[in-house]
Image: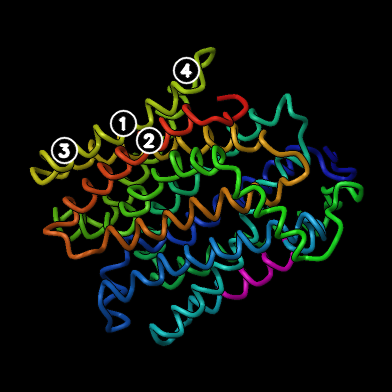
Amino acid sequence: MNPQKYLPQWVIILLIVILSTIPPFSTDMFLPALPEMVQSFGTTEAVLNITLYGFMFFQAVFMLLLGPISDKYGRKPILTVSIIIYIITSLLASVAPTIETFILCRMIQGASSGGMMVISIALIKDCFEERIRNTVLTLTVVLGVVGPVASPILGAYIIEAINWQSTLAFPGLLTIICLIITLLFSESLPAEEKLTGNLPSVYKRMAGVCRHKSFMTFLFAMGIFSLPFMAYLAVSSYIFVEGFGIAGTTYSYMLAVNAILGTLGMLLLQRLTKGRSNKTMGVIVIIFAFVSSFILLGAGHLNAAVCFIGTTFMVISAFAARPYALGILMSQFDGDTGSVSSVFNFTLVFIGCLGMAAGTLPWPTYITGLGTCCLFAGVLGALLMYATVKAKVPLKGL
């Protein structure tokens, strides 16, 4: 643990929170405008959705690449370069004249956000003692929900007041705060903890993390709940705005309420499971995914309210799974924080990419596809959780 010499801990928490909210701001802010963007670029829903899961794919790849590099060279240089590239590509995306240029900007933007996200997780372990690390993690997850809550509402008003292009520039301008803080703070990774050897040897250490069967099984058991959640983000505007005829502003408030209920549900579950077996939270996450699938497949087409209730259970499941899994997995390895962060974030984002692609498949309806994704996540999550519990080499803390 390497406390900052020049900045108080609340500033570091602010940095981590903003870095955690940038990906939601990068996607959720222009979700209300997706139908309008299809017409503006003269393209199709399928092509435009490439900008969503393409962003996520490059984000995931660069999380995997940059985490181990930060273990060798430090957090500050990786974070500084990532922030600068993100700011530039955000502004360029806002003035992209064609869908091809827009897609390219989004890919590079995703790559830079990958560096920002992986460092944000590593900073939690670098800058805070173990006794308060989980508290900081929960706090940043809760405050990080400001992104999903605020971005659709803010995006809807910006779209109405200015245009949808402005929703792409806003996250870049917000990230300038992160750049200022990053330039002021000292390197968080102590020199004696930096990995030695060449880059191939560094990546071999990450491969060692991936070869830990119980680690990877549990990671996929909880990470799979990112699949229906990201599928929901990809198709929610088509379900509520085009399908049910909800106004764009009302739709943005619905997403905000989804996120608020997801956060409150996560906190309530953490409180109810405190002092109980760590397996309890995993079981509840799985149950909530099944409840969501049954509501969506059984009655989700009836009206917007029923569909909204079904998606809320899914959001709570996804929100609760992330801090639960990360708290357990971060304690499995010492000295490989960047690698663990890379593998964790890569897996969740890659699964999220698959979710966005799955949500936009030619289902009979988008609601049917979303319910099927929830059902798939529940079944696979249950099987992998069972395999983790019965593994010969158990995880610490599970």
Amino acid type shown at disc 2: Ser
Amino acid type shown at disc 1: Phe
Helix, strand or loop under label 2: helix
Q: Is residue 88 above or below residue 234?
A: below
Whichever of labels 3 and 4 marks the residue nearer the N terminus, that label is: 4
Q: Residue at x 32, y 63 (%)?
A: 357
Whichever of labels 3 and 2 marks the residue nearer the N terminus, that label is: 3
Whichever of labels 1 and 2 marks the residue nearer the N terminus, that label is: 1
Mark 3 neighbour density, 10 Å: few (under 14) some (14–19) many (20 or more): some
Magenta-highlighted stretch: main secondary structure? helix
Query: Does the magenta segment cover residue 154?
Result: no
Between marks 1 and 4, how big is the CA–CA gap?
A: 15 Å
Amino acid type shown at disc 4: Thr
Q: Is residue 120 left or right of residue 311?
A: right
- In the drawing, what numbered circle is on residue 306? 3
- Image x and y of residue 180, in percent: 75, 59
Between marks 3 and 4, how big is the CA–CA gap?
A: 28 Å
Q: Which numbered disc, 3 or 4, marks the residue closer to the eye?
A: 4
Q: Is residue 310 left or right of residue 137?
A: left
Helix, strand or loop under label 3: helix
Mark 4 neighbour density, 10 Å: few (under 14) some (14–19) many (20 or more): some
Count of numbered tags: 4
Mark 2 neighbour density, 10 Å: few (under 14) some (14–19) many (20 or more): many
Between marks 3 and 1, how big is the CA–CA gap?
A: 15 Å
Mark 1 neighbour density, 10 Å: few (under 14) some (14–19) many (20 or more): many
Q: Which residues are magenta?
A: 79-89
